[in-house]
Amino acid sequence: MSSTVALPAHNTSSASRDILHSLLRVGLLPLLLLIVVVGTSLMSPYFLGWLNVLNILRMASFLAIIACGQALVIIAGGFDLSVGAVVALSSVVTAKVMAALSTALGGPELLVAVLGVLAGLGSGFAIGLFNGLCVSRLKVSGFVVTLGTMSATAGIGLLLTNGIPVYGMPNSFVKAIGRSQVLGFPIAIYIGLAIVMVIAFVQRRTLFGRYVYAIGGNQEAAVVSGVSIRRHLVGTYVLSGVLAALVGILLTALVGSGQATLGGDTMMLQSIAAAVIGGVSLRGGIGRVEVVAVAALFLTILSNALNLLHVDSRLQPIFLGLIMVVAVALDEFSRRRMSSV
Amino acid sequence: MTTAEGSGAPKDTAEPLLVLSNITKRFPGVLALDGVDLDVRAGELHVLFGENGAGKSTLINVISGTFPPSSGSFRFAGRDVGELSPSEARTIGISPVFQEFSLVPSLTVEENLFLGRESATGGFLDTRAMRHRARELIDELGFDLDPKARVDRLSRAHQQMAEIAKALLGKVKLLILDEPTASLTERETGRLFELIAKLKSQGVGIIYVSHRMREIRALADRVTVLRDGRHIKTLKAATVTDGELVELMTGRRIDVLFPTITHTPGTPAIEVENLTTADGQVAGVDFVARAGEITGIAGLVGCGKSELVRAIYGIEPVAEGTVRLRGETIEKLDPRSSLRRGVAYFPASRGAEGLALTRPIRENVSMAALDLPRYQRGGVIRQFAERALVKPIMETLKLRPPNIERAVGNLSGGNRQKVMLGRAMARDLDIFLFDEPSVGIDVGAKVEVYEFIKRLVEQGAAVVVVSSELPEVLALSNRLYVMHHGKIAALLEGDQRTEQNVLSSFFEEEKREKAA
């Protein structure tokens, strides 16, 4: 009987702690997201307009796809600075291959489009493979290797185009991938969602995902446990390269031409920002892509809001930079609180 | 060994150097110290004794100013001490040497010694004076330590010396040593004991944390036993027995630390011929371990004994020699295929090589077994199978609390070792290589580890135990190899396995090397 008397008192104290606990577990990200959404919709009537919403979701999908790859690399204890340059390269390669095939074959547009997409993805695969092999075989730090490939990749993109946009892609490709909609939403959004879900599954339920966590958590322990380090490290960089290339292709279809100016440093920095705000530890071993995707959405909405509120475009980077530092500091704080709860 | 012939005989009349009364320290959700009293007199060596998590480290952290006590009074050198920061503690003469080193790896010994208290004039470092002082101090301590060497290039033993030198640089009234001999060789330990005797005769009070009975016997004036954050008893070291101390510490009687193991030697499981590692730490070793028995490897720090098992497992690159497992010659050794052949390795440094601290217990336990088809299909993990695997394992190992989703980083040393043992149980293995299986864990956990090893052997597994703790390898092993400078100095079987024989085989080897 005494236990039934004691229980209610215990429950109330632990209930309030549970609320705090779950709030801290979810993190401050959803809260920040809510504040920005509500605040901006009150200040700007255009914010919740359908076109603007679609625009935000599309851009957020692009960022989320890249950030997923970036997150995996960081969780394994690395860094991929080359993603922005890979976006540009894959855009140029896709457009060039499609244009060349169209004139050479003149043949079925589907074949041309498929080959072009494969070439674009292949370019990302190649850069990722190079990054991964350098990191795992030559033991150069990922930061340095990808800093090098970032520069080289951007150079190749410019060399291929001389800075001039590449036209001549099949019209149906641009229409189908870039402009068409399913159930009122652009295809890019579905692709983004699918990728986040697949990678979330990979993280939770596959050997690859588990070993990436283990390698980032303690590489030596993973070695002793018989995990093949090289293969999985290469895997993270390849995945990151391919995902960045995919975004390059989607952007190319959207703008209708291959451009060496797509992606770039901004996209690379934003992908790291999304990963870090999304709770990926720079020390490795921690992070979940679904949270990273929410962080990507948050960053996209934030920059959209700054545009709508007519904040000087020169001030925007300053603002974004500060937000990022604050978001990470708050997150760190909440995590420390949580570990002591 | 030095006996402090009453040179620092505590004077009972004067107020003790350090008086703590009713110290309580509360962390969120944990009462780490609960009304603890402690007094240390000038010239006294006071041992803190207790299991992991008994509150020893919290107590020495309070004394050295890492964090303040929640309540209680703290008097030092006749004055009340209020808020104390680590640097203030050093200024008033409290100098701690922690187990976790406080050295910056990329700086030299000298730079580390003076870190935070450099001598400088007008912002410019007075390098010459510091160099002089560092040299002087190291010579005075009699350490074989180069002040210009970078810390990350030093062995652990030398890092320990640098740490002690750092603690003794200023004016020290109270020295705190937390398991200082854990990584020292026999000779260096002797040197440290002489130094301790000298400091005592100069009136320095010493707080000494150690699990090793032998050291307590050799050094201690008084012993304070802590358990679950509470002060259990303070006793005169001269009158207390080992059994009493252990009983006070654990709160229960532990009659036999080492279990009686029935060895039934069978066929050779590991045969090593003329093995030399790439780094030369192991040079031309022949070694055999049979199923159904424990093969011990004893030796001093740096004699190549852990490198030998690491080479067998495939972590240490091999220059020449052959390794046969169950009669089959292995061409290429690597951890992955070793596991597939049924070989498990338990590294000595569980933090550095054993466990992913940010990940939950479940993932750490299953890490080495997930490639088995039972636990995955086409690279997709079967979560139910995984949980059904890990949960009962950790139950048999008596994980407390029994939550397998906790991050390993939050666990005590004993529980971490259980996670390591659990990992080996997750696969069907029959050759087990233990590298220092009981380092850094308390008596209670040690007993459980020994019981675990006993079960393995009696089920017919081949077990190799590498240990710097002589009593441990002597008691556990059926056959005992003694290593010295990368070579096998002796193989002791049956009645030959005595401490005397092990030690004399070190010295004979030493003499032979000198003669050569």
Image (cartoon, rainbow, N blue to C red):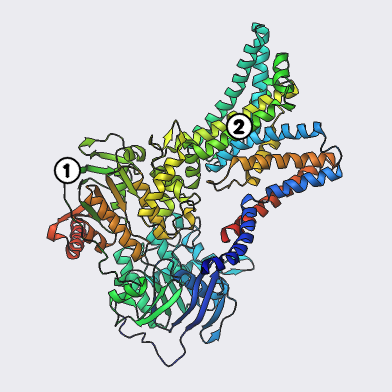
In the rendered image of this protein, does residue A80 appear above or below residue B39? Answer: above
Q: Position of residue B236 (x, y in %)?
A: 34, 83
Please indicate whether residue B385 sits to the left or right of residue A25 in the image. left
Label placed on residue B244: none
Assign a secondary structure to mark 2: helix
Nearer the observer, B77 or B127: B77
Residue that carries the numbered disc 2 in the rendered image: A195
Q: Quadrant of residue B243?
A: bottom left
> Residue B267 has which mark?
1
The amino acid pointed to by label 1 is Thr
Which residue sits furthest bottom? B13
Q: Say if residue A318 shows up in the picture.
A: no
Residue type of the residue flagged with mark 2: Ile
Name the side, left or right, on which B487 lies relative to B413: left
Q: In what element is the residue under mark 1?
A: loop
Relative image position of residue B346 (x, y in whole percent): 34, 50
Numbered label tally: 2
Q: Residue at x 75, y 23 (%)?
A: A255
Image mark 2: chain? A
Q: Nearer the viewer, residue B28 or B12?
A: B28
Residue A54 lies in quadrant: top right
Classify residue A184 as left or right of residue B351: right
Residue in the image at 51% along x and 85% along y? B77
Residue B337 x, y percent position in the rendering: 33, 37
